[in-house]
Amino acid sequence: MAILECHDLSKRFGSIQALDGVNLSIEPGRVVGLLGPNGSGKTTLIKLANGLLTPTAGELRIDGKAPGKETKALVSYLPDKEYLPEWMNARQLMDFFSDFYADFDRERAAEMLNRLGIDEGMRIKQMSKGTREKVQLILTMSRQAKLYLLDEPIGGVDPATRDYILDTIIRNYNPSAAVVISTHLIADVEQVLDDVIFIRSGRVLLQSSVDTIREEQGKSVDAYFREVFKC
Amino acid sequence: MEWNIRSDLPIYSQLVDLFRQRIASGALPPGERLASVRDLATEAGVNPNTMQRALQELERQGLVFSQRTNGRFVTEDVQIIDASKKALARSQIESFLGAMEKLGYDREGIIALLKEDA
């Protein structure tokens, strides 16, 4: 059964149609790229899946259920903004996540922090941007969730941090969970994806596998994306 | 191991080719145990399902076999390895001949040139 499903999903903000009749389905065990230019509706879709927004029309289901308390236990979300309280240190954050999420694997988080040489007593305030991004990702990926929603996880980080983030996503791969990565930096993520969803102006243009696109188009998903979204 | 993956070809078929090259050259000797799918995927920086698909294709070709609990191994059947090696060599020769033909060389001309170099 699909872990995430949308049927004719629409979201309107005043006069702006952020999502317009989206239909898609994501199966467990897949790593999916949600790809589209700025303002195409990626973040809106992810926020709807988290229950942070409600649809104007249509529906979205997580493991067959409408977003709510039950689905929040299944979904691990990495927002596109820094959201962790600055005064907290890494240890307090792990306590916080342990309290909040029954599926948080504290040992795994501690081990990943240790591997990066991040001291558990270090406060968010003291961390560089790259380190904050890594800590947020570690906390997100240390949950044993069914669906990981990563909104722009590699935006604005240096290449070494980007490699670390992609490596962490592969290392934590779980065949019973799906990972959705929203980004416009396609060349960087292409190799770790099973499938891609192209989204433009709130509509799904295409859902396909990376290797199918390469086979049929004879070019990378990045090159194909540039062609489809040519300004 | 080096994993140079080009952007214009399917990733899984490139992984298959890389393994075939390593098996042909002996870098992965007969009977050698392969790392787990997850470790190989992490090392290559590719999706684990794609790595899995490549290994299944190698199994289908008889170059790799899996033991239920122990993992995957390079075949010990030297004939299969030799045949795969020859097929790789042939496709190299074919693309070489194609490139030489574009330069205006016929077979004899190519052979003469090769002898000059040897």
Image (cartoon, helix red, strand yellow):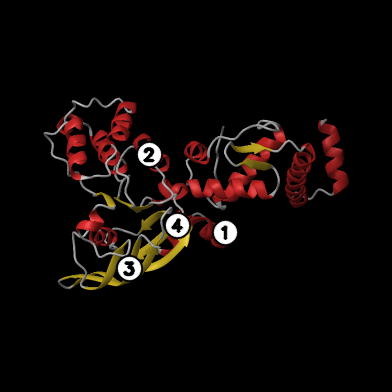
Which is nearer the eye, A160 or A69?
A69
Q: Chain of mark 4?
A: A
Q: Secondary structure at mark 2?
A: helix
Q: Secondary structure at mark 4?
A: strand
Q: Is residue A117 left or right of residue A171?
A: left
Disc number at residue A195?
A: 4
Q: Is residue A16 left or right of residue B76?
A: left
Q: Are marks 1 and 4 in contact (CB under 8 Å)?
A: no
How crowded is the residue under tag 4: few (<14 C-alpha within 10 Å), some, or many (20+)? Answer: many
Same chain for the residues at labels 2 and 3, yes or no? yes
Residue A20, picture quadrant? bottom left
Q: Are marks 1 and 2 in contact (CB under 8 Å)?
A: no
Q: Position of residue A23 (x, y in %)?
A: 35, 70
Residue B112's place in the image compared with A217, above or below, is above
Q: Chain of mark 1?
A: A
**Residue with the mark numbered 1:** A215
Alpha carbon distance from label 4 to label 2: 18 Å
Q: Earlier in the sequence, mark 1 or mark 4?
A: 4
Which is nearer the eye, B118 or B13?
B13
Image point (38%, 51%), residue name = A177
Looking at the image, can residue A57 be seen? yes
For the N terminus of chain A, give its image quadrant. Answer: bottom left
How crowded is the residue under tag 1: few (<14 C-alpha within 10 Å), some, or many (20+)? Answer: some
Image point (71%, 37%), residue name = B24
Alpha carbon distance from label 1 to label 2: 28 Å
Q: Are marks 1 and 3 in contact (CB under 8 Å)?
A: no
**Residue with the mark numbered 2:** A168
Q: Earlier in the sequence, mark 2 or mark 3?
A: 3
Type of residue at label 2?
Thr
